[in-house]
Each structure stands twice: as structure tokens, then as C-alpha cells.
Image (tube, rainbow, N blue to C red):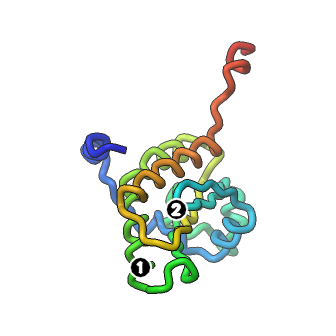
Amino acid sequence: MTDIEVTSNAQNERLTLRKSAKLRHRTLVQDLFQKGKSVYSGPLRVTFHTLSNEELEHSFRVRIPDLMGPVQMMITVPKKKRRHAVDRVLMRRRIREAFRLQWHHLKKRVQEDPTIRTLSLAIVYMDTENAEMDSIMIAMDSVLHKVIKKLFPQPKEDEICLK
């Protein structure tokens, strides 16, 4: 994504990550890693899982907690890959910033789909070296487009002609 696209999107909508975008419930994290699908691009692997309103209600005992956004994410930098805490924190910050600048397309698509109540994402950094912000931005753009393609597959041209 170029700087021009980021600034034009920033004028239309505030590019912020609120608390509602943070994946923090144990049951949702467990479901994400047990039932989720994964895509990989560059140093990033994203595991994602969609939940309908009924599935979300069954995940909690009493009721759905407040602050449940349409897209919730968590970032993981494994200690085996980056031994020093300083490096793990640096990569988490870079990944969070790349996600913050590029997640609005995914959020709009999820909000438009009536079958999806929330989309859980786990972003895992897989490289053994610190990556530059440019490569993280490119990988994030690629991996989010792959998630969109898996969630919302486009009909093939043959199917369009038959209808």
C-alpha cells in the first residue's frame, strides 16, 4: 500500500486500534488455534476463525462481553524465534502498526457480511531476524488480502456465465 492510499484512507476514517480490536478471551483464542485456518506471507503467518452470533453466544457462559469488535487480533512473536525481549517488543510494535494502517478493508468486508459476527486473527512472526518496517507492511498487505480471498471467495467466471 502506498503512502498516498494510506493518507486518503486516513482522511475518510480514523486509523485507530481500539480495545475492541484486541483478542483477549481465552475461549476465543483456543477456538482460533483449534478450528482456524492459516495463511502465510513473508515473515508473517495469520491464523483466522470466524464466529457467527450463535457460536459467539455459546462461547461464553452468561452473555457476550462488551467491546467485542468485528475484527479481533493478537500478535505473537515466539521466544524461540526472537530470544531478546527488546526484539520481540520491536517486532510486535511494527506488526501492530502495519495492521493498524491496513485493516480497514478487512473490517468493512466483515461488517457487510451478515453471517459473520466477529473475525479472530492471530498474527505470528516467523522469522529469526528483525524485519524492516517496509517488508512487514508488504507482508501484512499480502496476508490480509489472502485472508479476504479465503473468507469471501470470488465466483469463477464460468459460474457467472451460467447464472
**Mark 1 — residue?**
87
Element class at badge 1: helix
Q: Is residue 72 left or right of residue 28?
A: left
Camera sees residue 96: no
Residue 118 at what x, y percent from top left?
Answer: 58, 56
**Vertical side of 156 occupied by 18: above or below:** below
Quadrant position of residue 78: bottom right
Which kind of residue does numbered mark 2 sit on?
Pro
* Residue at (52, 57) in percent of width and height: 42
Other-residue count near label 1 (Cα within 10 Å), few / some / many at <14 / 14–19 / ≥20: some
Task: State if disc 2 and disc 1 touch (CB < 8 Å).
Answer: no
Q: Which residue is drawn at 54% across and 74% down?
A: 24
Picture coordinates of residue 36, whole percent (x, y): 70, 60
- Amino acid type of disc 1? Asp
Does residue 159 appear to the left or right of 95 in the view shown? right
Residue 119, picture quadrant: bottom right
Mark with earlier residue (1, 2): 2
Residue behind mark 2: 43
Q: For the residues marked 1 and 2, what is the alpha-carbon distance in whole angstroms? A: 14 Å
